[in-house]
Image (cartoon, rainbow, N blue to C red):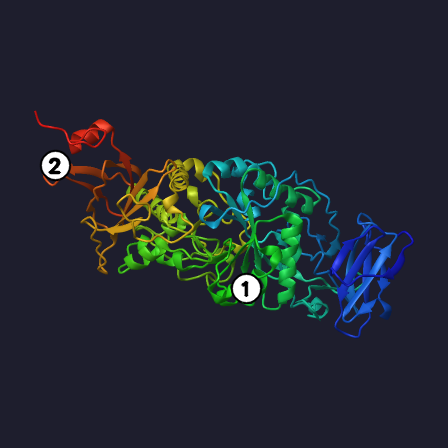
Amino acid sequence: MKKIKINIGQPYPLGTSVRETGINFSMVNGSDKECGIIFYRKGIEQKERVLFDQKHRIGNICCVLIEGITAGDCEYNFFIGDKVFVDPYAKKIVGNEKWRSGESARPLLRGGFDRGTFDWKETAPLHIPYHESVMYCLNIRSFTRHSSSKVKKKGTFEGLLEKIPYLKELGVNSIELMPAYEYEECEWDDTDSSAKTQIEYQVNHIDERLLPDADTDAEPPRAKRLNCWGYKDAFYFAPKASYAAGSNPCEEFRRMVRDLHQNGIEVIMQFYFPDSVKQGYILEIIKHWVLEYQIDGVHLKGSRLPMTLIATEPLLANTKIMCEDFYLHEIYPNGMRPARKVLGYYRDEYMYDMRKYLKGDQDTLKSFRYHMRNTHQRCGVINYITNYYGFTLKDLVSYERKHNEANGENNTDGTDYNFSWNCGVEGPSRKKAVKQLRIKQMKNALSFLFTAQGTPLLFAGDEFGNSQYGNNNCYCQDNETGWVDWRELDRNQELYTYAKDLIAFRKCHSILHLDESLTTLDRYGFGYPDLSYHGEEAWKVQYENYNRHIGIMYCGQNGEGDADHIYIAYNMHWNSHRFALPSIANHQWISALSTEAGNVVFDEEKNMEYIDIAPRSVSILTGRKLPEAQIRQKTGTDIKGRRGRKR
């Protein structure tokens, strides 16, 4: 290395920061052992050590400013005593650039440097409100890794960008990324002789991933299986290098965010934090991604999350923060309401209750009604009927039991509570009736999702029936089981078209995605409540526990200030039902979307419209305004409202 000069550094920020005169290094050492930096020449094993002395220590933080090096010169690790470890604040991780499927030797990971210069082209986070968001959850690698994806940079950030036209056509405007920060995908077997060198050493924030010194003769541990999802301890400040098509994952991640923003699509990052991760460290991670990568939000997973600390951080006032629960009385004391909803409830209740109703379970109507109108004054509500854990939508209607044998855990992994129904045959079927029923059930599920209040979240591939062959925990399946099979898009165009039309229908009718609760009152002055419930008789709902059918009518306001009438008939019973449609003045009901064609009939004797709903189907109707001539004929009045005389 070049001749370097060591000066007293600054304790914060921890990790590394590039200055005009050099690079500042800051680390935590809670012991009395000597510590310092190991520099690695790029591509060369030889290394140089820089030792911290007492003048470089402030409390438990050791820091130096080193002149004579640049970010492009080298890589580094920290050491405490004889243990070498990767900087938990490293902005880039070197050594894990290749996806290590089938690798046997554990790589020596090092910290790298993020140059940080990037042209954002005047883009910025989009701040799409929850009630206008349509979310789409995906894994960067599995989304485009399959040969059928037809992208050039398969399984990478660049590969996702190649799918932007598809995402826009589908209608989603928010992408939720499963862990895309750096983690070791290989699960290492630490029971061999090298386990003695892999001890845990508590260093302020996390139990560091300690690596043996390169000079040791210890045999490296062996990989026992893959973890393709990354819900484990990780290097949280760095984008995952093996998800990058090129050599600069930091720049590639920024380019992905920028291009998605230019196309009106938000980026939400998932983070999983084990209990050992310190709470202050979690806050620093989130702020880093918001500042450096301009992400739009985070979905936080873990059992010891500092949600009040995060939710009250001023820097994150416009950033979506999603989690299972919040202490709202601490975040918004004295009943105050936020100027902007940034918190979002991300819970499984909707998923499980809707699955029960979908398969026709008894006594599910009341919970169905609750979820269809559920909103919150101070938080968004995220709805999903499938997610990465549990069955895909296709498998939800094709399997009653999980089939995880290929995971190597004797089918004991993954949830046993899927609330699924296989439509009469376990797994693939050639029976035409079974295949048609499964398509209809998937359409029904999508209908629930996109006609409910709250924010819909679609799991990648569900819109065209992607299957994982009954595996409900594909965390280790880096193969065609875990990858999205884009051939299904051609095979299931009917399902994809229905999903796309549903999303478009939702966006066109604001009454289906309000920022506030429906009141069941005449909110807009059109003579009808904004929300009403119906059974086989109009205005009379049947909530008996054996019933599985319900009609819901909405009366909203369209873009021109006129009434927007929507009637949706849901029938998850195995028998058909006839619904009497509510009469709406100067309008007639017409079919908009249906999972199976329902016939609208008019009974002239009763002057009443009906709709026949087939078993296990959903029909969506809209009110079309009658022409003035037809209104006059029907009511006996002229255009100005004067009643005509009989001659």
Amino acid bearing label 1: Gly
First reached walking from the N terminus: tag 1 or tag 2: 1
Which of the labelled discs sits on residue 338, or is there none? none
Residue 281, above or below 71: below
Relative to 109, 152 lies left or right? left
Residue under numbered circle 2: 604
Q: Position of residue 313 (x, y in %)?
A: 60, 60
Q: What secondary structure is found at the residue carrying circle 1?
A: loop
The C terminus: image quadrant:
top left
Mark 2 closeness class: few <14, some 14–19, many ≥20 residues within 10 Å? few
- Could you tell me if residue 614 is visible in this image? yes
Q: In this view of the protein, which residue sits in the foreground, 358 or 503? A: 503
Measure the alpha-carbon separation of dots 1 and 2.
61 Å
Q: Position of residue 441 (x, y in %)?
A: 33, 47
Residue under numbered circle 1: 302
Q: What secondary structure is found at the residue carrying circle 2?
A: loop
Query: Mark 1 or mark 2, which is nearer to you?
Result: 2
Relative to 462, 240 lies left or right? right
Relative to 630, 426 lies left or right? right
